[in-house]
Image (spheres, rainbow, N blue to C red):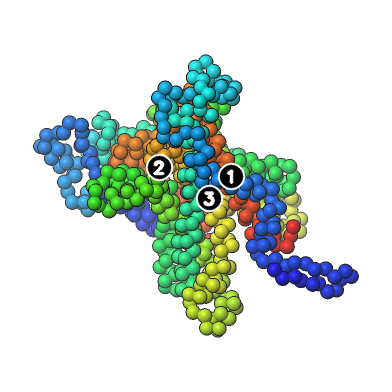
Amino acid sequence: MGRYIMRRLMWMLLVLFLISLITFAMEHAVPGGPFDREKKLPAEIIANLEERYHLDEPYWKQYALYLYDVLVPRITRQKPTSMAEETMINVKLGGNYYLRWMNFGPSYTSRSRTVNDIIREQLPVSIQLGLISMLIALVIGLPMGILAALKQNTILDYLGMSVAIFGVSVPVVAMGPVLVWIFGVTLRWLPPTGWGAKPPYLLFFIPRGIFSWGFWRYAIMPAFAVGTGFSAIIARLSRASLLQVIHEDYIRTARAKGLSERVVMVRHALRNSLIPVVTILGPMFAAVLTGLFVVESVFGIPGLGKYFITSITNRDYPVIMGTILLYAIFVVIANVVVDITYAWLDPRIRYE
Amino acid sequence: MAVLETANSAVPVRRRTAGLWTDALYRLTRNKAAILGGTLVILLVLMAIFAAQISPYSYSEQDRNQTDAVPTWMTALFPTIKPYAKLSGQFPLGADYVGRDLLTRIIYGTQISLSVALVGPLIALLVGTVYGLISGFFAGRADNLMMRFVDIMYAFPTMLLIILMMAFFRTSFAESEPGTFAYAMNAIDRRFGGMLFIFIGIGITAWMGTARLARGQVLSLREQEFTLAARAMGAGNGRIIFRHLLPNVLGPLVITVTLAIPGYIATEAFLSFIGLGVNPPTPSWGSMISDGAQAIRTYPHQAILPALALSITMFAFNFLGDGLRDALDPRLRGVQ
């Protein structure tokens, strides 16, 4: 098990390194610098700014500095003095010491906020929405799939699988506007835009109103827009998997041993059938992230995805690169966690 | 198709044995959902081919006097727009926010989506199969190396990679100097209607699945007797790969690739939605939904209609893909 984990972690580092390299290379292959304004700035000011942001150094040095900024946590004694040194994670350790980590650099289009500010304000919203979407996907998809498998070829099965085909065929880009139209515009049950939580958040992402309807009425529609697609995938997968497991010999043995049907189902069949579902959670996490881009745009939610899209339109490269890097880190870590969980659940994988 | 005569029966029974594809075709045509999907796909293809003939207007022609025009029957479907809708019988489905005809743009949108649905699997099949065949056939060091490469690429979050690439293509290549490689690529892209980069993006992420699958199949097939027999008869490597291994590998590959088509369509719609897909004014359903989402409270039909078109297309391909998979499933052979 330990060797498997080591291998996974090494893959993770390799992939992250490659992504950061590609991101950085692309950022600097694009024409247009951070200080191109309508009115050209005087040459000395441009030179000064370039020196401050290290833009006149050779590329490999800039890359090394960027990596250093993003990856290495530092403990310093002075308060952050300027935008260039503002970091995303800024924890006061008591006395005069600060722990600082992850500095993604300035934003090209926003004069008052750095990439770190943007991420700090808007990432929690995206995390909230992402978690709720995955929750909805699991809560709807798993029972549907399991029921369909247990009651195979009955009306419940056909109904469940029809809903699943529907969910798989309607992508998030289509589901979002339809939901807004039905529930926000025509029926007016739920607000079509906006979000029900504001900073500060507990533990970086838990909103204060988490148990109130005021928060959930904003969250339901977008979470459903993203979640229904995945609930369909989970339903299909869990149904196929449970059907396969039920016909295995060890289930027959368990029944022959005299175990009650309930124990056979829950302790043996269900547990083993859920393993493929766990494997799919990794890629699903990445797909939820991209789904978030769409719903945040359609539902007007102040999350990181929406800002990412506007930064693409505005060609704000540090934000684009920083967000992609951040998302890549999340996705790769999520994949590694899922792989490790999968190996823990299914011992056959460990010895590959 | 051979005809089999069974002995040992009171009445001599002649039963036709069918090859894999004939049997599959038989089962496919019995599957109602697959027939529905297939018919829809054919209709969409016809719509895409004859788009210029059947659409009433041009997809880029703007009529600034008729922005957001709505046909009268639309107010019955979308009752909230009655108070302020600008009624006009000129556009069959209404106009968008700069006065372009929605029906025309939806019809032209099929061209974009269907071209992605065609090229994606094509690249996946061509590149992936050849790669997987070679890798599986020459197992050993070459196979190891090739699969390491695939593993690295597999570990990348593909969506992010596509977004990164498209952002790169659409910005740096668009603003490049004439005479550079980037400028030439951009010119080719414009010839393709803005689709070249999307094809490249989707292609780069599509071939890996088929490569792995093909390699797995080849690794198991090359141990079987028919390869040995072919080798004994003096067949060279190339002949064995393409004449013997390839036909046996194609079945599961075609299934996987057909099932992935709705994913490609959704990816293209997503890219167009976030502004990294085709360039305006070329209509893609994704960009139409994005435009319509801005006006979702006032003119919801501008977003709903392309969303409907997208969903119907994906439904059709999903049904067809599912039907194909059930038809080609070897475990169901001989079972009606």
In the picture of the structure, the residue carrying the numbered disc 2 is B278
In this rendering, position of residue A49 left or right of residue B125: left
Q: Are marks 2 and 1 in contact (CB under 8 Å)?
A: no
In the picture of the structure, the residue carrying the numbered disc 1 is B43
SS of the residue under disc 2: loop
> Is A269 or B77 nearer to us in this picture?
B77
Name the residue at 41% across, 34% down: B60
For marks 3 and 2, give the CA distance.
19 Å
Screen quadrant of the N terminus of chain B: bottom right
Q: Mark 2, mark 1: which one is toward the viewer?
A: 1
Expressed as whole percent of the image width and height from the top left, the position of residue A227 reads 54, 38
Q: Are marks 2 and 1 on the same chain?
A: yes
Direction front: furthest residue: B53
**Label 1 packing within 10 angstroms: few (<14), some (14-19), many (20+):** few
User: Identity of the amino acid at label 1?
Assistant: Leu
In the picture of the structure, the residue carrying the numbered disc 3 is B261
